[in-house]
Amino acid sequence: MFLRETLVYFKSLTTENNSLIYLVDLMLKLTQDKYTNTCNTVGQNTKQTKDLDAEEDIENIYFNSLYITFKDKKSLDNSKKEEEINTALKLIWDSFILALDMYKLSEKLYDNFVETVYKIIEFCKVNSRTVEFRRLVE
C-alpha cells in the first residue's frame, strides 16, 4: 500500500496531471522492463497458471523482485525460476491495477485510463491470463 498511498498523496499535492502521468508511465515501463529481463534471463515459458491476485501485497512483490535481481541467475532451479517469473508477473499486474486506480482520480486522465486498459488486455492475451482478465472486466 505504500506505493499507492505515495502516488495518491503526490496527486493531492500537485495540480498538474502531467507529473502523475509521468510517474505512472515510468512505473509501468520499469515493471515491463523487469518482466522482459526476467523472461529473457530465466528463459522459461511465461504462461503460468498461478493466480496473480492471490495473497501478496505489492510491496512484498517489489521486495522479492529486488531480492531476485541480486541473486545469481545461474543457480536457480525450476521452482525458483517459476517463482521469479510469477513475481515479475505479479509486479506488472499490480502496477497495471495501480495505474488504473491513479487514472480514475481525474476525468482529465480518461485517455490514459483507456490506454492502460488496452495494455492490460494485450498483456492478458499474450500471457494467457484469462482469470485476471475476467476479474478486470467485472
Image (cartoon, rainbow, N blue to C red):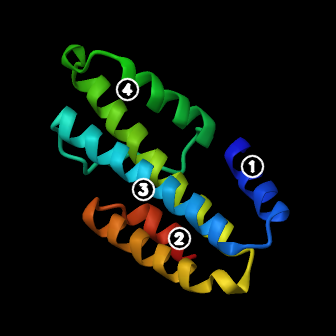
Q: Residue at x 24, y 21 (%)?
A: 73
Marks 4 and 1, the one that precedes in the sequence? 1
Residue at (51%, 61%) from the top-left corner?
96
Give the residue type that dot 4 points to: Thr
Quick one: label 3 or label 4, which is nearer the N terminus? 3
Sooner in the amino-acid sequence: mark 1 or mark 2? 1
| Amino acid residing under circle 3 | Lys
Instruction: Report how far apart the C-alphas of labels 3 and 4 lie in the structure.
Output: 17 Å
Say which mark, if any, is on residue 88.
none
Distance from the alpha carbon under mark 3 to that under mark 1: 18 Å
Taking 121 as reference, is 84 above or below it? above
The answer to whether the residues at label 4 and label 2 have Cβ atoms under 8 Å apart is: no
Compared across the picture, whether 121 is left or right of 59 comes to left
Residue 29: mark in rendering: 3
Which amino acid, mark 2?
Leu
Alpha carbons under labels 4 and 1: distance apart = 24 Å
Q: Which mark is residue 136?
A: 2
- Neighbours of disc 2 within 10 Å: few (<14), some (14-19), many (20+): few
Vertical position of residue 33 compared to residue 134: above or below: above
How far apart are the alpha carbons under marks 1 and 2? Answer: 23 Å
Residue 69: image tag? 4
The secondary element bearing badge 1 is classed as: helix
Neighbor class of circle 1 (other Cα within 10 Å; few <14, some 14-19, many 20+) is few
Q: Which residue is mark 1?
A: 6
In the structure shown, which secondary structural element does the residue marked by tag 4 occupy? helix
**Is residue 138 visible to the viewer in this orientation of the structure?**
yes
> Can residue 101 be seen?
no
Q: Position of residue 35 (x, y in %)?
A: 34, 46
Q: Residue at x 41, y 78 (%)?
A: 118
